[in-house]
Amino acid sequence: MRDPAGSASCHVDHKADGLAEIRFEGDWRIHADLPSFADLVRRIESLRPAAGITFDSRELKAWDSGFLTFLRKLMVHCQSKQIAVQVEGLPEGARRLLQLATAVPERQGARREARRTGWLARLGGSTIAYIAATKDMLAFLGEVVTALGRLVTGRARFPYRDFGVLVQDCGARALPIVSLISVLVGLILAFVGAVQLQMFGAQIYVANLVGLGMAREMGAMMAAVIMAGRTGAAFAAQLGTMQVNEEIDALATLGISPIEFLVLPRMLALVLMMPLLCLYANLMGIAGGFIVGVGMLDLPFKQYLVQTQNAVALNHFMVGLVKSAIFGVIVALAGCLRGMQSGRSATAVGGAATSAVVTGIIYIVVADAIITVICDILGV
């Protein structure tokens, strides 16, 4: 039996005295392509050695722990099948190491057995973890509100120079992706509405559908989802990396509040930019619907604009802008919270970024549903 690379091989021969002899050849080091253990076991079982197994290692060129691991697995298998193993044909160093490996028997109960947890225990553990996470979130929110109060009274350590960079990153640099997604969403809304409205000859109401949908719901929602995946994850990764480099600990040692210096400027920058991004997304979405209405449904240019103007009042835009500001707070808090909670490893930073996106999107949808119900109750 030889492996494809040919660097290490073993052969099984049946001897006249009832023994099965295993001959090792080549380089049996851990980096080499070692033969398949399963193939060797099948070959041994096919011979059914009555007296046991011997070894011939005269053609063995080199070996290390990979060879010993292979031998140990073979000996354990033979022991389970009650096949005697004679190690005299192995190299002297290998025999000594195998003797050391089997000198002290394994203590009973040393291996950790997998324990199956009941569904009630899992439910209780998940509930306790959720309550602890809620407490941490409320404590973090309280610290942010306290830092905001200190900023208003002029007592906070606020990085005004970095704030301008954050505003640019949350605003102008997000315009390309917001433009693309918003135009496509407007196109999709117009297509979906046109399929149904054409059945009644009411194609002109595509303008109402796209305008109201973008102004009240989709503009703010899509801008928030984009910022959760783009900016929220970036906030979590930045703060998580600072945790790994112990920069946040250094700020606390210097008497500078990480909440005031790191979290507050990011939250304010995103809250200030989200309404502007929402308004821009509304306009891009309406432009996407305009392309479908005028270019494909052959609606008059002026009539489409007048229909949109009559359908979408100022209060509809205000609802979307209020939603976007709330969504900005949610995205910023989710990103900064997960970043501050990040562990001190590269894997933890990646997990914090993923958790920030998931948390942000979940709370965006929940907040949107709550605000929509409130608007319906108030008749807005």
Image (spheres, helix red, strand yellow):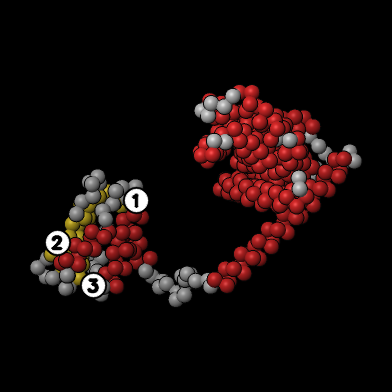
Q: Name the quarter where the N terminus is drawn.
A: bottom left
**Residue topped by disc 2:** 13
- Foreground: 217 or 236? 217
Q: Name the quarter where the C terminus is drawn.
A: top right
> Where is residue 263, by image quadrant?
top right
**Residue topped by disc 1:** 30
- Foreground: 220 or 309? 309
Q: What residue do we see at 64% from left, 62% from top?
A: 129
Q: CA distance from mark 1 to mark 2?
A: 25 Å
On residue 83, which mark appears? 3
Query: Of the residues shown, which amino acid type is indicated by label 2?
Result: Asp
Q: How far across and down, in percent of the image, does residue 209 sit?
A: 62, 38
Lower position in the chain sequence, tag 2 or tag 3: 2
Q: Answer with left or right where residue 354 lies relative to residue 53.
A: right
Q: In the rendered image of this protein, does residue 16 appear above or below residue 190?
A: below
Lower position in the chain sequence, tag 1 or tag 2: 2
Lower position in the chain sequence, tag 3 or tag 1: 1
